Image (cartoon, rainbow, N blue to C red):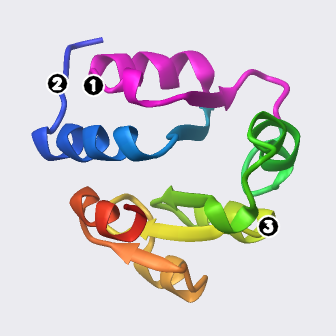
Amino acid sequence: MKDIGEPAPTKSALIALAVAITLGVVSNKHVNFVNLFLEKLNIHTFFDLIIGDDGQMVQKPAPTLFYSVIKPLFPELNNSEVLMVGDTAVDLLFAKNAQIDACWAAYGYGDRHECVSLEPTFVINNIEELSSIII
């Protein structure tokens, strides 16, 4: 895979967030691909938890990963302290099904009408806006 570098604003935002909170990635893509992609972007070290498909996981939008993996790892957290940031309807439905807040990354790949209709708690137009919601 060609080194694609990382967008400077993304890395700066992740640095600010990683200092303040625990960050994780939940993807329906294969876990090896997710890890490789994060490493190529040189941002993998910002994430405390990386979950990808291993051939056995129940994929988003089912809330299974949240209740069987994430909650047991962080039992002290209330659902109100967790935020799912995603760019597709599947991500937003995962949050809704897991009963956690959702932040739609409107700059991503999701269909605007479909994502807005799911009424995410927050909408951001770039990753820099995330800090004002969380920190």
Nearest to N terminus: mark 2 or mark 3: 2
Q: CA distance from mark 3 to mark 1?
A: 30 Å
The residue at the point 45 percent across, 69 percent down is 104
Residue 42 in the image: x percent, y percent? 27, 21
For disc 3, the marked residue is 97
Relative side of 129 to 94, left or right: left
Of callouts 3 and 1, the N-terminal one: 1
Give me the disc on residue 5. Answer: 2
Nearest the camera: 15 or 54?
15
User: Who's the residue at 73% across and 63% down the image?
Assistant: 79
The answer to which quarter of the image holds residue 2 is top left
Residue that numbered label 1 is attached to? 41
Could you tell me which quadrant the N terminus lies in?
Answer: top left
Marks 2 and 1 close (CB-CB < 8 Å): yes
Res 39 quadrant in image: top left
Q: Quadrant of residue 94?
A: bottom right
Q: Mark 3 and mark 2 in contact (Cβ < 8 Å)? A: no
Q: Which residues are magenta?
A: 30-57
The amino acid type of the residue labelled 3 equals Asn
Q: Residues within 10 Å of mark 1 (few under 14, many from 20)?
A: some
